[in-house]
Image (cartoon, rainbow, N blue to C red):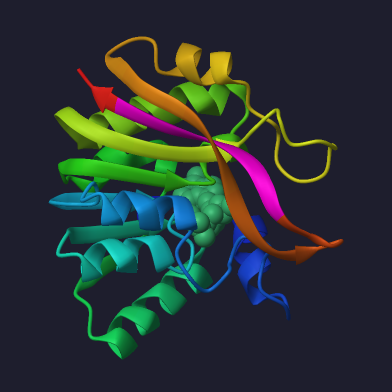
Amino acid sequence: MTEQADPGWDASYTAGAPAPWDIGRPQPAFARLAEAGRLTERLLDVGCGTGENALLAASCGAEVTGIDVAPTAIARARAKASERGLAARFEVADALNLGSLRLTADTVIDSGVFHVFGDEDRVRYVASLAAVLRPAGACYLMCFSDRQPGTWGPRRVREEELRAAFSGGWAIESITAATFEINPLEGITQVQAWLAAIRRT
Ligand SMILES: C[S@@+](CC[C@H](N)C(=O)[O-])C[C@H]1O[C@@H](n2cnc3c(N)ncnc32)[C@H](O)[C@@H]1O
């Protein structure tokens, strides 16, 4: 572990019911990336939660590390890897300090993490991603979208904000409309998202 875990995030994994995002299967958008052969090589899942996207990548042959600030989530991810006979490494670590992991990734995935950060931490986060992703490596990032009505849940992200955040040292290959699947929340089971494919230059 590289930094003090945030008890706020851990609490979302120790509550009685699974957190809205903890759906017990990979997000379909990441399943499509796996089918397309994009989740490969040395892959880092940042803010991996209980590990479903990371374990999907591991089942496709990627050399996977998943990190999360919540120890309970990491313990569950490790248990799932063991139960499924998958080789994946899961560590408690801070997404804002990925350089301390002392690893190099060919591929980074982010399912629902970028949008948790405020403006200042967003800058730190992008720099942190750059510290572990090799030049020409790919980052696949899915975040809440401003197309999602309402104000509940994480902050909405505009496409221009994504472009601005990754404007220096990155090439945005695509930003496409996507959806998060969530556990039913006030009758909602899908949330509008952006899926960005970004390459480090
Ligand atoms: C919306 S959840 C998404 C979890 C997972 N990617 C998924 O798709 O199920 C956001 C995750 O980011 C983690 N997180 C928040 N801040 C973090 C930080 N500074 N470092 C590492 N993980 C963080 C939380 O603990 C939580 O697991």
Q: Residue at x 18, y 43 (%)?
A: 105
Question: Is 132 left or right of 12, judged from the image as shown?
Answer: left
Can you give x and y, in whole percent of width and height, for residue 23 in the image? 58, 69
Can you give x and y, in whole percent of width and height, for residue 39 in the image? 24, 51
- Picture quadrant of residue 158: top right
**Residue 101 colored magenta?**
no
- Picture quadrant of residue 83: bottom left
Can you give x and y, in whole percent of width and height, for residue 38 in the image? 23, 46
Tell me: residue 135, above or below residue 24. above
Can you give x and y, in whole percent of width and height, for residue 57 in the image? 27, 61
Question: Is 24 left or right of 191, judged from the image as shown?
Answer: left
Question: Is 138 left or right of 183, judged from the image as shown?
Answer: left
The quarter of the rendered structure image containing the C terminus is top left
Q: Residue at x 47, y 21 (%)?
A: 123
Asked whether residue 168 is in view, the answer is: yes
**Residue 191 colored magenta?**
yes
Asked whether residue 4 is in view, the answer is: no
Q: Residue at x 60, y 65 (%)?
A: 10
Stretch of the chain drawn in magenta: 190-198
Q: Residue at x 32, y 68 (%)?
A: 55
Tell me: residue 167, above or below residue 17. above
